[in-house]
Amino acid sequence: MRPTVAVVEDTSLIRDSFGLLMPGLDVVAAVPTVEELVRRRPVVDLIVLDLHLANLEQQPDVRQGVAAIRALTGCGYRVCVYSQEERRFVLAACLAAGASGVVSKALPTLRAEQLFLEVAAGGTVVPQPVVGILEVLVRRDCITLLSERQRQLLHGRARGLSYAQVAKQLYVSESTLRGYWLELTRSLSESLRNLTPGEIEHALGLAPGDLLEFWAGEPTDAKSWWRTDTAS
């Protein structure tokens, strides 16, 4: 059976065509705001959330970014962010806030659909830029739960090596590595959620307090998260 999905997207063209473009997903709801989704409370396997909602100026109380992720996960939903955002500290903040995956809108539709299916099935999708962050956190002992083999795999993937290249270096099969990667991404996303903004800032080399511009204190606090006028 196809996983059931709800889409939160303020661009009507994307919202209305999502199910047609990704036939492997059963889109049962498509709405422009998190608030409308929470009011409807559809029973779904996954929420696909647009991180940038253009209606912030017109509707300042509409939840954005981290605040939106926390609101949805607080309702028990599994969330995958779908965004053009590339700043690695923002992507890390999304995972730390509870998102189970981040998928780039720049990806081909088929690849994006595959990643949504992976998250809906219980997996975790960690973008390549965030993999580098996670490796830094591991090396700085902010995350210590990994086995030596998982650390080696993380090291290779953080440098852009393919599964085949890492498998050749470690003398194991690609299928074995993919199993390690599934366990590793789940573990790291859980660990990332337990870190403070200060710890993530330190790993990223940001100035103290920089990340707080993008970190909502409470699920209802929309204004302290997404400020495009101050974002770098």
Image (cartoon, helix red, strand yellow):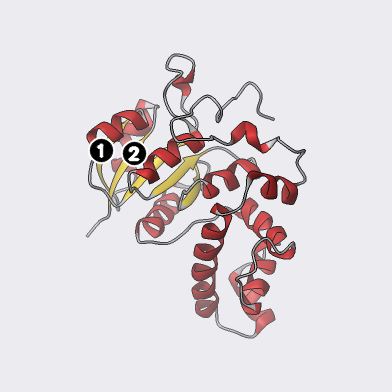
Q: Nearer the viewer, residue 195 or 175?
A: 195
Q: Check disc 2 and give the amino acid type.
A: Val
Q: Check disc 1 and give the amino acid type.
A: Ala
- The residue that disc 1 covers is 29
Image quadrant where one finds the C terminus: top right
| Residue 165 in view here | no
- The quarter holding residue 84 reads top right
Residue 125: percent from the left, percent from the top?
49, 56
Q: What label sits on residue 7 in the rendered view? A: 2
Cβ atoms at labels 1 and 2 below 8 Å apart? yes
| Residue 177 in view here | yes
Q: Residues within 10 Å of mark 2 (few under 14, many from 20)?
A: many
**Residue placed furthest toward the top:** 58
Q: Residue at x 67, y 49 (%)?
A: 200
Is 221 placed left or right of 32 in the picture?
right
In what element is the residue under mark 1? strand
Q: Residue at x 64, y 40 (%)?
A: 87
Q: Residues within 10 Å of mark 1 (few under 14, many from 20)?
A: many
Is 178 placed left or right of 16 in the picture?
right
**Residue placed furthest toward the bottom:** 171
Q: CA distance from mark 1 to mark 2?
A: 6 Å
Q: Residue at x 68, y 56 (%)?
A: 132
Labels 1 and 2: the sequence-earlier one: 2
Q: Tell me: residue 24, above or below residue 81.
A: below
Q: Residue at x 29, y 46 (%)?
A: 5
Q: Tell me: residue 114, above or below residue 83.
A: below
Residue 8: percent from the left, percent from the top?
36, 35
